[in-house]
Amino acid sequence: AESCEDAPAEMLMRVWQWWNGSLSAPGRPRSHPNFPRHGLLRYADDPNPRLRQLALDDPESTVELVERLSRDPHEEVRYRAATDARLSSASAVWLLDDPHEHVRRAAAGHPALPARTLVQLLRSPDTAAAAAGSPGLPEPVAERMIEVLRRLRAEATG
């Protein structure tokens, strides 16, 4: 279904409930052009966490829903909320203490993190890579990182 360009929306929804995609088609079936986008809000309170997280993809979903799902009992739903650009900086910071590493890593790369928090994350080997990829990284910090990398490469090769 994930590689069939004319797969019907209903089939893609059924597949989504049990399948995370493959290396040959990452993000599918959710990223499939026929995957439904409207009407997903009805899943916001679904007992199935795979469906619950889809509510964030609905164009009518709200910041309030993102915030609520960032506190969801299921880590997969919190992970999805951590990757949503609408998540508040306070919630992104809160998710940095999540018990699940992939949720913490997603939160560490969130663009809403305060600069001070990002700098702290850059200093930790556990979170530096995720924080370095954050679009919220202050330009002077990024420039300093590039400068340090150039110097380290020069020292290693010369």
Image (tube, helix red, strand yellow):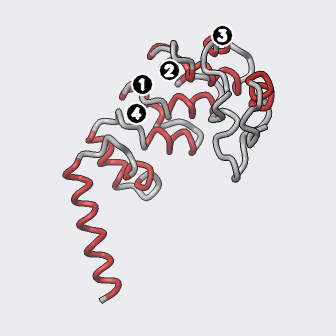
Which numbered disc, 3 or 4, marks the residue that appears first in the sequence?
Answer: 3
Camera-side residue: 78 or 1? Answer: 1
Query: Residue drawn 56% across and 18% down?
Result: 58
Residue with the mark numbered 4:
93
Cα gap from disc 3 to disc 1, whole angstroms = 19 Å
Report the mark closest to the observer, 3 or 2.
3
Which numbered disc, 4 or 1, marks the residue that appears first in the sequence?
Answer: 1
- Say what amino acid the circle numbered 3 marks: Arg
* Label 1 environment density (alpha carbons within 10 Å; few <14, some 14–19, many ≥20): some
Cα gap from disc 4 to disc 2, whole angstroms = 14 Å
Circles 1 and 2: CB distance less than 8 Å? Answer: yes
Report the mark closest to the observer, 4 or 2.
2
Which numbered disc, 4 or 2, marks the residue that appears first in the sequence?
Answer: 2
Cα gap from disc 4 to disc 1, whole angstroms = 14 Å
- Say what amino acid the circle numbered 4 marks: Val
Q: Please identify the quarter of the rendering in which residue 118 is found.
A: top left
Residue with the mark numbered 2:
66
The image position of residue 11, as x and y in percent, is: 80, 26
Residue with the mark numbered 3:
42
